[in-house]
Image (cartoon, grey):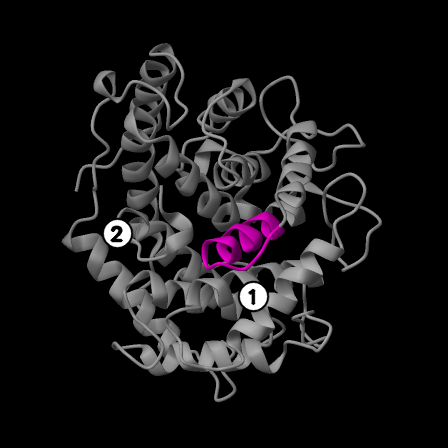
């Protein structure tokens, strides 16, 4: 397989940006190259191996792996989304029972207040767990016969709505005090997925969240961690900010264009940026942003991240990450499946 080099990628990016606005919908697609699929047999085989690995790592209660992140609901939700993205349904398909296990585990930890959190896991913020778990429930809703799924999903979404702070964002705890960009994007994704299923989400909630995201943008086009405190731009959260905007129905404008220009300075190869700590997080969002942008942006980006991930897959089908191999593998599968994903949240 011929891999994209950093120089070739940047040459392609320069051509992309010189062609004008790279935002997605609303532009003249006749002047844009068709968005290619790039999902080949080798990539499919890699995803199949990754899903097989995840299946072996699921516990009896429905969580994944061993160690400090075993009970983490965000990891369970992402693993469930990886199974869904490949066309499995709860109780149906090769991993149908594994999906049922994911759903049961998340629902078992959904409290009467709507908060989804075990209270026991090593977590980078309870609202991260809540947001990814709620996103997973929304993506599973409509395919699962479990009678309490919608009720718990509605409560989970209402908790997000009720805990939005005055700035328009969210932070680690379900309280209306501080906010940061990363947690805010996580909640926006859950809200959009729930909205897609028919769960009521006030437009004002989304509008306020996007205004918060926009206030985090720096002059270089990237995004800072918080809106009310100066901070440097970073690739992972900048990619996340773009996805939040797309999912809010924003497809063009200066904020989006500058953000895309910033993100595309950081090719997917490991040497392309210094955010290896958040590699999977950043590229989970970046591939969604490029999928939405389409055209030259997508055609340059996806083969590069695909080849990087194929190079990094281990012999047992997994991908390594500091959080856990289950987290890294679920993220890698979601990224690689993007051209053929069955997840509604990834639709353009």
Q: Position of residue 23 (x, y in %)?
A: 41, 24
| Residue displayed at 15% across by 54% down | 41
| Residue displayed at 32% across by 69% down | 51
Look at the image and tell me whether residue 81 can be seen.
Answer: yes
Q: Quadrant of the C terminus?
A: top left
Secondary structure of the residue carrying numbered label 2: helix
Q: Which mark is residue 164?
A: none
N-term-proximal mark, 2 vs 1: 1
Q: Is 126 in the magenta?
A: no
| Residue displayed at 24% across by 16% down | 31
Q: Which residues are magenta?
A: 186-201
Q: Which residue extends farthest right?
A: 177
307 on left or right of 238: left
Give the image quarter of residue 54: bottom left
Secondary structure of the residue carrying numbered label 1: helix
* Residue 28, placed above or below residue 43: above
Q: Position of residue 42 (x, y in %)?
A: 18, 54
Look at the image and tell me whether residue 325 can be seen.
Answer: no
Front position in the image: 260 or 305: 260
* Residue 325, placed above or below residue 13: below
* Residue 76, placed above or below residue 345: below
Which secondary structure is most common in the magenta stretch?
helix
| Residue displayed at 45% across by 39% down | 286
Crowding at mark 1 (Cα within 10 Å: few <14, some 14-19, many 20+) = many
Q: Position of residue 102 (x, y in %)?
A: 47, 77
Front position in the image: 232 or 254: 254
How many marks do you count on the picture?
2
Residue that label 1 marks: 133
Q: Position of residue 151 (x, y in %)?
A: 58, 74
Q: Which mark is residue 340?
A: 2
Real-space Cα separation, disc 2 to disc 1, in angstroms: 22 Å
Front position in the image: 226 or 91: 91
């Amino acid at each position: 397989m011929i891999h994209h080099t950093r120089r070739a990628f940047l040459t392609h990016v320069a051509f992309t940006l010189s062609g004008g606005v790279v935002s997605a919908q609303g532009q003249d697609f006749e002047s844009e190259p068709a968005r290619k699929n790039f999902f080949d047999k080798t990539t499919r085989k890699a995803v199949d191996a990754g899903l097989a690995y995840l299946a072996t790592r699921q516990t009896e209660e429905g969580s994944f792996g061993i160690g400090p992140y075993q009970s983490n609901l965000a990891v369970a939700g992402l693993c469930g989304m990886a199974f869904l993205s490949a066309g499995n349904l709860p109780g149906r398909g090769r991993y149908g029972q594994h999906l049922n296990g994911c759903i049961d585990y998340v629902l078992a930890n959904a409290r009467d207040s709507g908060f989804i959190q075990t209270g026991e896991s090593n977590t980078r913020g309870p609202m991260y767990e809540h947001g990814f778990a709620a996103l997973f429930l929304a993506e599973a809703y409509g395919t699962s016969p479990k009678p309490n799924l919608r009720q718990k999903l509605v409560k989970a979404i209402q908790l997000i709505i009720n805990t939005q702070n005055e700035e328009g964002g969210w932070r680690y705890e379900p309280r209306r005090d501080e906010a940061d960009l990363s947690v805010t994007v996580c909640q926006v994704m859950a809200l959009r997925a729930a909205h897609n299923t028919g769960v009521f989400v006030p437009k004002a909630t989304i509008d306020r969240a996007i205004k918060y995201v926009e206030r985090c943008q720096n002059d270089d086009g990237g995004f800072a961690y918080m809106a009310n405190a100066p901070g440097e731009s970073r690739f992972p959260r900048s990619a996340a900010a773009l996805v939040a905007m797309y999912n809010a129905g924003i497809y063009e404008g200066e904020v989006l264009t500058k953000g895309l220009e910033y993100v595309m300075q950081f090719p997917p190869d490991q040497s392309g940026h210094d955010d290896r700590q958040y590699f999977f997080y950043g590229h989970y969002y970046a591939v969604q942003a490029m999928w939405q942008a389409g055209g030259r942006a997508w055609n340059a980006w996806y083969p590069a991240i695909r080849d990087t991930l194929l190079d990094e897959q281990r012999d047992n089908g997994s991908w390594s990450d500091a959080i856990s191999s289950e987290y890294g593998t679920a993220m890698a599968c979601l990224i690689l499946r993007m051209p053929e994903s069955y997840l509604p949240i990834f639709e353009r």
